[in-house]
Amino acid sequence: MADNPTIQQLKRLERDLWLRTYLMGILEFDGETKAPPKGAPARAEAMGALAGEYHEALTSASAQELIAQLEEAAAAGELDEQTATELRVLAREQREAVAIPTEEAAAWSKLTSEANAVWHKAKLANDWESFAPYIDRILAALKRQAACIDSTRDPYDVWLDQYERGMNSAAYDQFFDQVKATVVPLVHEIGKHPQPEAPFLTARVPESVQLDIARELMDIVGLDPEASVLDCVEHPFTNGMAPGDVRITTHIYENNLLSNVFSVIHEAGHAIYEQNIDPAYAYTCLGTGSTMGIHESQSRFFENIVGRSRAFMGPLLAVLRKHVPEAYGSVSEDQLYRAANIALPQLIRTEADELTYPLHIMVRYDIERMLFAGEATARDIPELWAQFTRTYLGLDVPNDTDGCLQDTHWSSGSFGYFPSYALGSAYGAQMVPAMAADGVDVDAACAAGDLAPVRTWLREKIWRWGAGKDAPELILNACGAPFDATFYCDYLQKKFSKLYGL
Amino acid sequence: MADNPTIQQLKRLERDLWLRTYLMGILEFDGETKAPPKGAPARAEAMGALAGEYHEALTSASAQELIAQLEEAAAAGELDEQTATELRVLAREQREAVAIPTEEAAAWSKLTSEANAVWHKAKLANDWESFAPYIDRILAALKRQAACIDSTRDPYDVWLDQYERGMNSAAYDQFFDQVKATVVPLVHEIGKHPQPEAPFLTARVPESVQLDIARELMDIVGLDPEASVLDCVEHPFTNGMAPGDVRITTHIYENNLLSNVFSVIHEAGHAIYEQNIDPAYAYTCLGTGSTMGIHESQSRFFENIVGRSRAFMGPLLAVLRKHVPEAYGSVSEDQLYRAANIALPQLIRTEADELTYPLHIMVRYDIERMLFAGEATARDIPELWAQFTRTYLGLDVPNDTDGCLQDTHWSSGSFGYFPSYALGSAYGAQMVPAMAADGVDVDAACAAGDLAPVRTWLREKIWRWGAGKDAPELILNACGAPFDATFYCDYLQKKFSKLYGL
């Protein structure tokens, strides 16, 4: 059936959808890095038009008929494996897009656009009250939409599954309970111990030098320089535009070199994933990364498990000494290791260290869960935020700007998204023993500054599959067992007990 | 008829076409400035798809029916002025696009794509013979296509009109005869005089300093910095992407500051035109510049008539002294003026000075004319090139790489394009006395470094009209008389006689 005109139609539809996604990616990157301020309205016009064209192409009557025809062919075993996978992924996306009535989608777009603008002002003015009504309206809309997508499931479960296929609140409850039991006492214990002194952390390193360092780190992670781009932005992100074109970004603080170092390694982890998807998936719906959690597992694997490991301090210090001899010439690997792994609770999620990061996610998860369960409304959020922050991080929240107004996600309607951020590190921790079982010694690769064996394993087990497999299948195939947070908890327990001499 | 649904359809069609053009502009800019090398195939895929979508939207049966309906309404006087203008411009574009049969267009796309690739190699290898057959095939195709567009006209006239509406070979003959009579003897005379010595021309000025200078020059031309972008590329260009977003580019040679200076002023001239089109034309087919010649008239007005004028040397020298005091501190305005206006024949068009530039165009025009008249074929071109170069520029052509293979234009099928390059300077020269008649003293504005009066005139007479008027109408409205090359010839005669003391 390979030359079947129906399959050709599917490939054309996918190419058409790819084109819109690619163009939106280019526009976004251009907007963040290059476009002049007054170009924003034209870009917004183009973005809106492309999003509309994408939706129209995906949900048109002819596209629905095409998918239905192909599902019959698939049931009859007439599709090759790749086409069957494309069909499965695209059919799910189409089904969910069609499920939301047009008026509901239009109202949603208007509501979240307004909410986002109100949030920007509210954050600056520490004014939760002005923003709270939007949260209630967003929640009501999300519950209606969840019922459209799958009326048989709990609405929060529907949204958790949207961001991380296969997950639900029962699974997250179990995961966070396990993390809580490990991390909360660990952070409490560490609080009794002195933090390392590391004056080199704030040494001034000019932007051009930091960019040279960034490029060397991209090489070590293994990015193809002919297929990658690095640029500076306000909030770093990665975009896998197309085969042969992956863009990473960083934000340079001249008196905080390590922020750039680990941000670049993190984004390079996202980028190398996109760069190693099976070339046969190019221009299809499979030609991008899998779930949010899997993508974050790759960035955090490189940032934390590799980048902040004791073994990697040798190669890392060599790069820093080469470019910043005056500040790093007399720093030892141990000193760098301790400085790169300071665990210290503070209020802002995006500045959190490896150990306290999941606690920030737990604050958000617990609140989201209560909101969907009807146990709280938007007006209760500041108090709940204060309460959970005290319980998990041991901190008082002085204001909402640094509390429940700090993140943009809820203002654009992304409830159920935060929890997937915490899974990444846990997926990654489970991969280390799986690599060992396959003969890949992560520590040895880190110490040698040659990550080729690690890349080979990740390419085979994770990267090449693109969006063709969801997280549960990827983890099972890669690690030989379902996801289990024990590996992550053990990893944190061992690493930070030893670091702080507990 | 303003709320007429047919008019709404027209506006939607124009917005749809604008979107494709905008996206192709962003892709081109991104490709030249940022994208990694391996991103090229994806960009080509997207470019091809967008071009196809543009053609489809413009020529679809429904678009043809729409234009036909609106032309009836226009004939009945039912359209407002702007809509009538949009209709006129779009209808012409549609008529010409529909005229070329689909198979002819597809064959053309394939032929020119191959020809361009062959030209790249041929230029490097000084191998005209490999490229010549493509020129003959391109010419045959251009004759067929010209017959589709307008079988009543001479094919070359059809193409001259495509690039510069209202022009034909009779008008160009007259223009070039006049220019020839002035410039050829002038260049010959200058050759007998010594050239000025100006060692500061090759002073090394680092890229960052040259970029600072470029930004000051953009300010002087009058670009809105919130709506403009400057970047570095191999071959400078300007792209008016959208309302509020105009991009200019330059190429920095560290030992040739003035190349960057005049290139930036040139591109800024293109850019300020795009930036000052009537905002009511945004997202319509009128929201871009008029003909090639008019666009070039604006860039060359700022580059030469302003930028290389004696009066502007004061403000220009102030900028150069501020940023490069060591090289320009002791240079006088007269020395700078003479150095910025060295007239010296050489082989490469893109490196030609103000005076000898039109001679390069005449070489190409004479050859194109003979090819279309059947008086020569591709194999005759090298000899003709040598002959015309000797006659006009007084130079021998040592090889085809620096001769008839130097430009890319013919390889992409652009015959009839070159002549429009020469018109720009001539249009601009005619505007100076027209400005004077309206009370605008260009010299005084240059000397003051405040070009606001010049901008006000150009905005009113040229810029605001966008693509709504062709060159003949713009010139007539702006100058109160049809185009007349006498102004240009007089300008060159006076300027260069005085400079070289003839």
Image (cartoon, coloured by chain):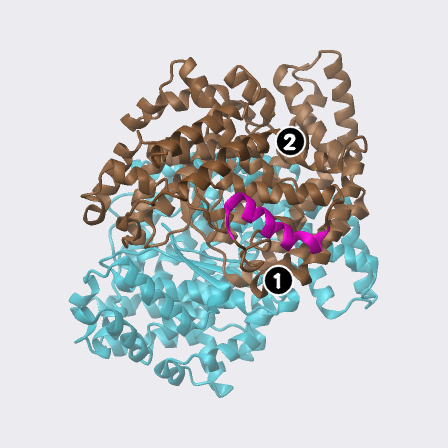
Chain colours: A cyan, B brown
In this rendering, the count of numbered labels is: 2
Residue that label 2 marks:
B14
Of discs 1 and 2, which sits in the foreground? 1
**From where the camera sits, is residue A115 visible?**
no
Mark 2 chain? B
Residue at left 47%, top 35%?
Answer: B270
Q: Quadrant of residue B213?
A: top left
Q: Quadrant of the C terminus of chain A?
A: bottom left
Residue B193 is one of the magenta-drawn residues? no
What residue do we see at 36% from left, 43% from top? B193
> Nearest the camera: A190 or B460?
B460
**Percent of width and height locating residue B261:** 35, 43
Q: Residue at x 78, y 58 (%)?
A: A8
Up the image or down, B305 lies above or below B135; here it is: above
Classify residue B84 by image quadrant.
top right
Q: Is residue A7 left or right of residue B340?
A: right
Disc 1/disc 2 C-alpha distance (Å):
40 Å
Residue at numbered disc 1: B122
Residue B391 counted in the magenta span:
yes
Local secondary structure at mark 1: helix
Q: For the stretch drawn in magenta, what is the main secondary structure?
A: helix
Image x and y of residue B67, in percent: 75, 26
Q: Looking at the image, is mark 1 or mark 2 earlier in the sequence?
A: 2
Q: Is residue B138 above or below residue A452?
A: above
As drawn, which residue projects farthest toward the top?
Answer: B77
Look at the image and give the residue range highlighted in magenta: B377-395
Q: Which mark is residue B454?
A: none
Residue B88: image x %, image y %?
Answer: 68, 23
Q: Where does the image place residue A421, in percent across and percent down from the top left?
A: 44, 60
Can residue B444 be seen here? The reply is yes
Which amino acid lies under the numbered mark 2 shown in the image of this protein?
A: Glu
For mark 1, name the chain: B
